[in-house]
Amino acid sequence: MNEIKPLSTQKDYLEYHLRELPYFRSLVRAIEARFYQGLPLPAPTLDLGCGDGHFASVTFDRNLEVGVDPWHAPLVEAKKRRAYLLLTQADGGKLPFADHFFASAVSNSVLEHIPHVDAVLREIHRVLKKGAPFYFCVPNHQFLGGLSIGNLLNRLHLEKLGEVYRHFFNRISRHIHCDPPEIWQKRLEETGFELLEWWHYLPPSTLAIVEWGHYFGLPALITKWLTGRWILAPYRWNLALTRRIVQPYYQADPRCPQGVYTFFISRKAEG
Protein backbone atom coordinates (compact mmCIF):
# COMPACT_ATOMS: atom_id res chain seq x y z
CA MET A 1 0.00 0.00 0.00
CA ASN A 2 1.07 3.65 0.38
CA GLU A 3 4.23 4.67 2.23
CA ILE A 4 3.76 4.42 5.99
CA LYS A 5 4.78 7.27 8.27
CA PRO A 6 7.27 6.54 11.09
CA LEU A 7 5.69 5.51 14.37
CA SER A 8 5.20 8.21 16.97
CA THR A 9 7.50 8.09 19.97
CA GLN A 10 6.22 11.22 21.72
CA LYS A 11 4.29 9.38 24.42
CA ASP A 12 5.11 6.20 26.28
CA TYR A 13 1.89 4.32 25.54
CA LEU A 14 3.29 1.10 26.97
CA GLU A 15 3.68 2.57 30.45
CA TYR A 16 0.15 3.92 30.46
CA HIS A 17 -1.24 0.52 29.49
CA LEU A 18 0.92 -1.54 31.85
CA ARG A 19 -0.44 0.41 34.80
CA GLU A 20 -3.93 -0.94 34.24
CA LEU A 21 -3.84 -4.00 31.97
CA PRO A 22 -2.13 -7.42 31.84
CA TYR A 23 1.12 -7.19 29.91
CA PHE A 24 -0.08 -9.10 26.84
CA ARG A 25 -3.00 -6.74 26.31
CA SER A 26 -0.82 -3.75 27.16
CA LEU A 27 1.73 -4.62 24.49
CA VAL A 28 -0.79 -4.96 21.67
CA ARG A 29 -2.80 -1.89 22.66
CA ALA A 30 0.31 0.24 23.10
CA ILE A 31 1.49 -0.71 19.62
CA GLU A 32 -1.92 0.11 18.17
CA ALA A 33 -2.09 3.44 20.01
CA ARG A 34 1.01 4.59 18.13
CA PHE A 35 -0.66 3.97 14.77
CA TYR A 36 -3.33 6.62 15.40
CA GLN A 37 -0.88 9.42 16.06
CA GLY A 38 -0.87 11.91 13.20
CA LEU A 39 -4.01 10.51 11.59
CA PRO A 40 -6.77 13.10 11.04
CA LEU A 41 -9.67 12.55 13.42
CA PRO A 42 -12.20 15.34 12.87
CA ALA A 43 -15.02 15.80 15.36
CA PRO A 44 -17.50 14.44 16.10
CA THR A 45 -15.89 11.00 16.34
CA LEU A 46 -17.59 7.65 16.90
CA ASP A 47 -15.73 4.91 18.79
CA LEU A 48 -17.52 1.66 17.99
CA GLY A 49 -16.88 -0.97 20.66
CA CYS A 50 -15.37 1.48 23.13
CA GLY A 51 -15.35 -1.03 26.00
CA ASP A 52 -14.13 0.38 29.29
CA GLY A 53 -12.68 3.47 27.63
CA HIS A 54 -9.08 2.77 28.65
CA PHE A 55 -7.71 2.65 25.11
CA ALA A 56 -9.29 5.98 24.13
CA SER A 57 -8.19 7.65 27.36
CA VAL A 58 -4.56 6.75 26.61
CA THR A 59 -4.49 7.06 22.82
CA PHE A 60 -6.27 10.28 21.93
CA ASP A 61 -5.36 13.77 23.07
CA ARG A 62 -8.99 14.86 23.39
CA ASN A 63 -12.23 13.37 24.62
CA LEU A 64 -13.98 11.57 21.78
CA GLU A 65 -17.55 12.63 21.25
CA VAL A 66 -19.33 9.24 21.38
CA GLY A 67 -18.42 5.78 22.62
CA VAL A 68 -20.74 2.88 21.81
CA ASP A 69 -20.70 -0.61 23.29
CA PRO A 70 -23.37 -3.34 23.56
CA TRP A 71 -22.42 -4.22 27.15
CA HIS A 72 -23.38 -2.19 30.22
CA ALA A 73 -20.57 -3.07 32.64
CA PRO A 74 -17.69 -1.74 30.48
CA LEU A 75 -19.61 1.50 29.92
CA VAL A 76 -19.76 2.01 33.69
CA GLU A 77 -15.96 1.89 33.75
CA ALA A 78 -15.72 4.11 30.67
CA LYS A 79 -17.84 6.75 32.38
CA LYS A 80 -15.34 6.91 35.24
CA ARG A 81 -12.46 7.47 32.81
CA ARG A 82 -14.20 10.47 31.21
CA ALA A 83 -12.75 9.75 27.79
CA TYR A 84 -16.03 10.44 25.97
CA LEU A 85 -18.57 13.22 25.94
CA LEU A 86 -21.36 10.67 25.49
CA LEU A 87 -21.60 6.93 26.12
CA THR A 88 -24.33 4.84 24.53
CA GLN A 89 -25.26 1.21 24.99
CA ALA A 90 -26.29 -0.06 21.57
CA ASP A 91 -25.76 -2.81 19.04
CA GLY A 92 -23.41 -1.74 16.28
CA GLY A 93 -25.89 -3.01 13.72
CA LYS A 94 -28.50 -0.49 14.87
CA LEU A 95 -26.89 2.77 15.92
CA PRO A 96 -29.19 5.42 17.46
CA PHE A 97 -27.75 8.33 15.49
CA ALA A 98 -28.85 10.36 12.49
CA ASP A 99 -27.48 9.89 9.00
CA HIS A 100 -24.19 11.71 8.27
CA PHE A 101 -23.74 12.74 11.91
CA PHE A 102 -20.09 11.81 12.52
CA ALA A 103 -16.98 13.25 10.86
CA SER A 104 -14.78 10.23 11.73
CA ALA A 105 -14.95 6.78 13.31
CA VAL A 106 -12.62 4.27 14.96
CA SER A 107 -13.07 0.64 16.00
CA ASN A 108 -10.00 -0.84 17.65
CA SER A 109 -9.83 -4.66 17.71
CA VAL A 110 -13.61 -4.99 17.77
CA LEU A 111 -14.97 -6.01 14.36
CA GLU A 112 -13.40 -9.47 14.55
CA HIS A 113 -15.81 -10.31 17.39
CA ILE A 114 -19.04 -9.33 15.62
CA PRO A 115 -21.05 -12.02 13.78
CA HIS A 116 -23.13 -9.48 11.81
CA VAL A 117 -20.13 -7.39 10.80
CA ASP A 118 -21.61 -6.45 7.40
CA ALA A 119 -24.63 -4.87 9.09
CA VAL A 120 -22.31 -2.98 11.43
CA LEU A 121 -20.25 -1.63 8.54
CA ARG A 122 -23.45 -0.46 6.86
CA GLU A 123 -24.45 1.39 10.02
CA ILE A 124 -21.05 3.03 10.38
CA HIS A 125 -21.30 4.09 6.76
CA ARG A 126 -24.77 5.52 7.32
CA VAL A 127 -23.82 7.72 10.29
CA LEU A 128 -20.60 9.06 8.72
CA LYS A 129 -20.35 12.18 6.61
CA LYS A 130 -19.07 11.84 3.04
CA GLY A 131 -15.30 11.57 2.97
CA ALA A 132 -15.11 10.83 6.72
CA PRO A 133 -12.19 8.59 7.75
CA PHE A 134 -12.79 5.23 9.38
CA TYR A 135 -9.88 3.48 11.12
CA PHE A 136 -9.93 -0.06 12.46
CA CYS A 137 -7.69 -3.04 13.17
CA VAL A 138 -8.35 -6.76 13.38
CA PRO A 139 -6.47 -10.08 13.54
CA ASN A 140 -5.89 -11.44 10.07
CA HIS A 141 -5.56 -14.77 8.23
CA GLN A 142 -2.03 -15.29 9.61
CA PHE A 143 -3.10 -15.21 13.25
CA LEU A 144 -3.89 -18.88 13.81
CA GLY A 145 -0.84 -20.06 11.85
CA GLY A 146 1.37 -17.87 14.02
CA LEU A 147 0.41 -19.42 17.37
CA SER A 148 3.54 -20.87 18.95
CA ILE A 149 1.92 -23.79 20.76
CA GLY A 150 0.06 -24.86 17.66
CA ASN A 151 3.29 -24.75 15.67
CA LEU A 152 5.10 -26.74 18.35
CA LEU A 153 2.45 -29.45 18.18
CA ASN A 154 2.86 -29.53 14.40
CA ARG A 155 6.61 -30.05 14.75
CA LEU A 156 5.88 -32.95 17.08
CA HIS A 157 3.68 -34.43 14.31
CA LEU A 158 0.55 -33.77 16.37
CA GLU A 159 -1.20 -31.81 13.65
CA LYS A 160 -4.73 -32.68 14.75
CA LEU A 161 -3.97 -31.61 18.30
CA GLY A 162 -2.47 -28.44 16.87
CA GLU A 163 -5.73 -27.68 15.09
CA VAL A 164 -7.66 -28.34 18.30
CA TYR A 165 -5.41 -25.89 20.11
CA ARG A 166 -5.87 -23.21 17.44
CA HIS A 167 -9.62 -23.63 17.66
CA PHE A 168 -9.41 -23.35 21.45
CA PHE A 169 -7.29 -20.19 21.37
CA ASN A 170 -9.50 -18.59 18.75
CA ARG A 171 -12.50 -19.35 20.91
CA ILE A 172 -11.08 -17.85 24.11
CA SER A 173 -10.05 -14.84 22.04
CA ARG A 174 -13.67 -14.61 20.82
CA HIS A 175 -12.54 -14.26 17.21
CA ILE A 176 -15.18 -14.78 14.57
CA HIS A 177 -13.34 -13.15 11.67
CA CYS A 178 -9.62 -13.68 10.97
CA ASP A 179 -9.62 -12.59 7.34
CA PRO A 180 -7.07 -11.30 4.81
CA PRO A 181 -7.16 -7.67 3.61
CA GLU A 182 -8.87 -8.73 0.39
CA ILE A 183 -11.95 -9.87 2.32
CA TRP A 184 -12.09 -6.64 4.32
CA GLN A 185 -11.61 -4.59 1.18
CA LYS A 186 -14.56 -6.40 -0.41
CA ARG A 187 -16.71 -5.74 2.67
CA LEU A 188 -15.73 -2.08 2.73
CA GLU A 189 -16.32 -1.47 -0.96
CA GLU A 190 -19.67 -3.26 -0.92
CA THR A 191 -20.70 -1.00 1.94
CA GLY A 192 -19.57 2.24 0.29
CA PHE A 193 -16.11 2.76 1.79
CA GLU A 194 -12.81 3.30 0.01
CA LEU A 195 -9.79 1.44 1.38
CA LEU A 196 -6.86 3.87 1.31
CA GLU A 197 -4.12 2.01 3.13
CA TRP A 198 -3.40 -1.03 5.28
CA TRP A 199 -0.47 -2.79 6.90
CA HIS A 200 0.16 -6.01 8.79
CA TYR A 201 1.71 -5.77 12.23
CA LEU A 202 2.73 -7.91 15.22
CA PRO A 203 5.11 -10.63 13.94
CA PRO A 204 4.80 -14.22 15.21
CA SER A 205 7.63 -13.63 17.71
CA THR A 206 5.55 -10.91 19.38
CA LEU A 207 2.40 -13.01 19.09
CA ALA A 208 4.14 -15.69 21.15
CA ILE A 209 4.62 -13.18 23.98
CA VAL A 210 0.94 -12.27 23.74
CA GLU A 211 -0.16 -15.90 23.48
CA TRP A 212 1.73 -17.06 26.58
CA GLY A 213 0.55 -13.98 28.42
CA HIS A 214 -2.98 -15.37 28.35
CA TYR A 215 -1.80 -18.17 30.64
CA PHE A 216 0.68 -16.24 32.78
CA GLY A 217 -1.99 -13.57 33.21
CA LEU A 218 -4.52 -15.83 34.92
CA PRO A 219 -3.72 -14.38 38.38
CA ALA A 220 -4.59 -10.94 37.01
CA LEU A 221 -7.96 -12.30 35.89
CA ILE A 222 -8.65 -13.45 39.45
CA THR A 223 -7.59 -10.04 40.73
CA LYS A 224 -10.00 -8.39 38.28
CA TRP A 225 -12.88 -10.55 39.49
CA LEU A 226 -12.16 -9.86 43.14
CA THR A 227 -11.22 -6.17 43.08
CA GLY A 228 -12.31 -4.78 39.72
CA ARG A 229 -8.66 -3.99 38.88
CA TRP A 230 -6.19 -5.92 36.73
CA ILE A 231 -3.10 -4.48 38.44
CA LEU A 232 -3.10 -4.03 42.22
CA ALA A 233 0.23 -2.19 42.43
CA PRO A 234 0.58 -0.03 39.29
CA TYR A 235 3.99 1.29 40.29
CA ARG A 236 7.26 1.30 38.40
CA TRP A 237 9.02 -0.92 40.95
CA ASN A 238 6.31 -3.56 40.52
CA LEU A 239 6.17 -3.32 36.74
CA ALA A 240 9.93 -3.00 36.11
CA LEU A 241 10.59 -6.64 35.21
CA THR A 242 7.51 -6.87 33.01
CA ARG A 243 8.51 -3.65 31.31
CA ARG A 244 12.02 -4.95 30.67
CA ILE A 245 10.65 -8.11 29.02
CA VAL A 246 8.14 -6.46 26.67
CA GLN A 247 10.01 -3.21 25.96
CA PRO A 248 12.03 -4.56 22.99
CA TYR A 249 8.84 -5.75 21.29
CA TYR A 250 7.24 -2.35 21.80
CA GLN A 251 10.24 -0.38 20.57
CA ALA A 252 10.72 -2.43 17.40
CA ASP A 253 8.63 -1.48 14.39
CA PRO A 254 5.82 -4.08 14.54
CA ARG A 255 4.82 -3.68 10.89
CA CYS A 256 5.87 -6.59 8.70
CA PRO A 257 4.42 -8.83 5.96
CA GLN A 258 4.16 -11.72 8.45
CA GLY A 259 2.17 -9.65 10.96
CA VAL A 260 -0.87 -11.39 12.42
CA TYR A 261 -2.98 -8.22 12.75
CA THR A 262 -3.91 -5.62 10.15
CA PHE A 263 -4.54 -1.89 10.53
CA PHE A 264 -6.89 -0.28 7.99
CA ILE A 265 -7.33 3.31 6.88
CA SER A 266 -10.54 3.83 4.95
CA ARG A 267 -13.07 6.57 4.31
CA LYS A 268 -16.67 6.92 3.28
CA ALA A 269 -16.78 7.41 -0.47
CA GLU A 270 -17.59 10.92 -1.70
CA GLY A 271 -19.98 9.70 -4.39
Image: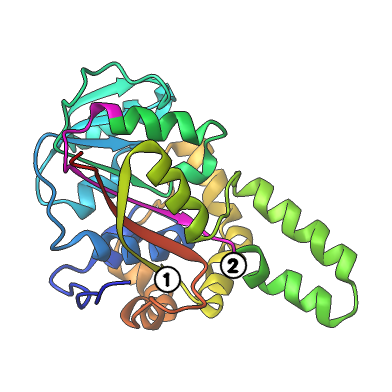
Disc 2 on helix, strand or loop?
A: loop
Query: The residue under label 2 is which amino acid type?
Result: Gln
Q: Which mark is residue 113?
A: none
Horizontal side of 7 relative to 122 (left or right) equals left
The quarter of the rendered structure image containing the N terminus is: bottom left
Q: Residues within 10 Å of mark 2 (few under 14, many from 20)?
A: many
Picture coordinates of residue 193, whole percent (x, y): 31, 44
Residue underneath mark 1: 201
Quick one: which residue is furthest to the front in this view? Answer: 271
- Using the rendered view, name the quadrant where residue 250 is placed: bottom left
Residue 134 on the magenta segment: yes
Q: Front-most of 98 and 189?
A: 189
Q: Which residues are magenta?
A: 126-142
Q: Is residue 85 visible?
A: yes
Residue underneath mark 2: 142
Of labels 2 and 1, earlier in sequence is: 2
User: Which residue corresponds to the image point at 48% horizontal and 34% vertical from the top-left?
Assistant: 118
The quarter of the rendered structure image containing the C terminus is: top left
